[in-house]
Amino acid sequence: MQTKITIVGAGAAGLFCAGLLGQKGYDVTVIDNGKKLGRKILMSGGGKCNFTNLSVEPSHYISHNPHFCKSALKRFTQWDFIQLVNQYGISYHEKAHGQLFCDNSAQDIVDLLVKECQKGHVNFVMRTQVEDIDSNGQGFQLYTSGGIMDSENLIIATGGLSMPALGMTSIGYKIAEKFAIPVVPVKAGLVPFTLHKPLLDVLANLSGIAILVEVSNQRMSFKENLLFTHRGLSGPAILQLSSYWQAGESITINLLPELVFESSFKLLLEQNRNQTIKNCLASLLPKRLIEALIQLNLMDDLTVKQLTPRQQQQLYYNLTHWKITPNGTEGYRTAEVTLGGISTDALSSKTMAVKTLPNLYFIGEVVDVSGWLGGYNFQWAWSSAFACAQAFN
């Protein structure tokens, strides 16, 4: 089989790029190891697909070169994709922090991408594993589980390693290594933390409780919900910080992010001085959490009036500077994104082409560009795919 352009990976970036190129009149074949198109899209956003964000800035992305994403994000913006969504009559809604979700189902986004591919007469080769690739001077030879394919141009859109149950593999990184393209070490991002015992045992009773916190480390801080789980900590605040966390580091949790001033806390205590601390703080924190904090010696089981001014100060500090050292993360199994990937030093930020091999391209999550939670990784998929497609004129 011979084709002008082969795209490896039928995810967000691969499908969008295929549709754009097909509609330019190119002979495009998409090859994927799964039986369904856009598997990760269908799982995303609780099945509703957080397809972009109303506010997209380069600062919402993590990369060894923070400037690399600027060109692509500028050339195909969130408004461009929203316009396409509107053209297809897909209804959507905004959640917190500008996140846009489908009203009905993530299937709407997959259908949009498939229809764009159909307009361009894109060929699909599914349930087919790419096993090896050679460059033959004029293009590439792909050795697959279904035979040999020849292609003048090759676009790698294989995604990362997150959610391996969906069939994600390391083939994209292996292809890079085959052609001596540097790969930034990969790890799970946007992922829950696991905890050590005995802390895990103490917090196990809190599983399912979500509270607004400000969670931080030496690099970043996020004010969003934290969710206690039977394995440790999750929720948007934790997922966001996990992408900036290094093994062995502690994190700091502020349980009172809305109570900015210590004086406000002391006023609350003064107004309830005859109550127990437990009852006094019940308006701010879940009772089960308060009991856990007492068990962890972060709070005394006393009445408010029994506290000295110094003890009041210490209580406020404990509640706003709760330090925890995670055991680790849940890893790729539950991670929403893969940090690291194909080094941006090896790629053109304008076309996503490999500088030393101009007919080889890498787009989407396989590249060392990882977005925050909130639709940013989908926007990178759309933007990098568009940049790549624009290279073919």
Image (cartoon, rainbow, N blue to C red):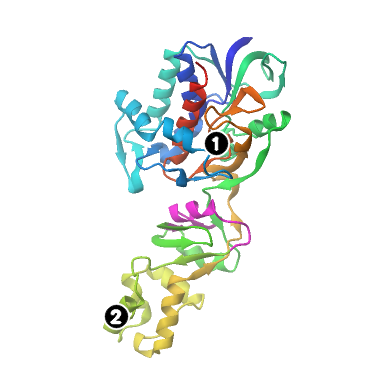
Residue 260, magenta (yes or no): no
Dot 1: within a 10 Å radius of its alpha carbon, few (fewer than 14), some, or many (20 or more) residues?
A: many
Above or below 45: residue 172: above
Three-letter amino acid code at disc 2? Leu
Q: Which mark is residue 299?
A: none
Q: Which residue is mark 2?
A: 267
Look at label 1 and name its amino acid.
Glu
Disc 1: which residue? 365
Answer whether labels 1 and 2 touch (C-beta < 8 Å).
no
Residue 62 picture location, percent across and down: 53, 46
- Report the side of 303 relative to 17 (left or right): left
- Residue 240 position, x and y percent, is 48, 52
Query: Is residue 267 positioned above or below 64 on the image?
Result: below
User: Residue 300, can we see it?
Assistant: no
Q: Position of residue 20 (x, y in %)?
A: 45, 19
Nearer to us in this view, 155 or 130: 155
Q: Secondary structure at mark 1?
A: helix
Residue 240 within the magenta-colored segment of the rendering = yes
Q: Which residues are magenta?
A: 226-249
Q: CA distance from mark 1 to mark 2?
A: 49 Å
> From what the image shows, is residue 337 above or below residue 146?
below
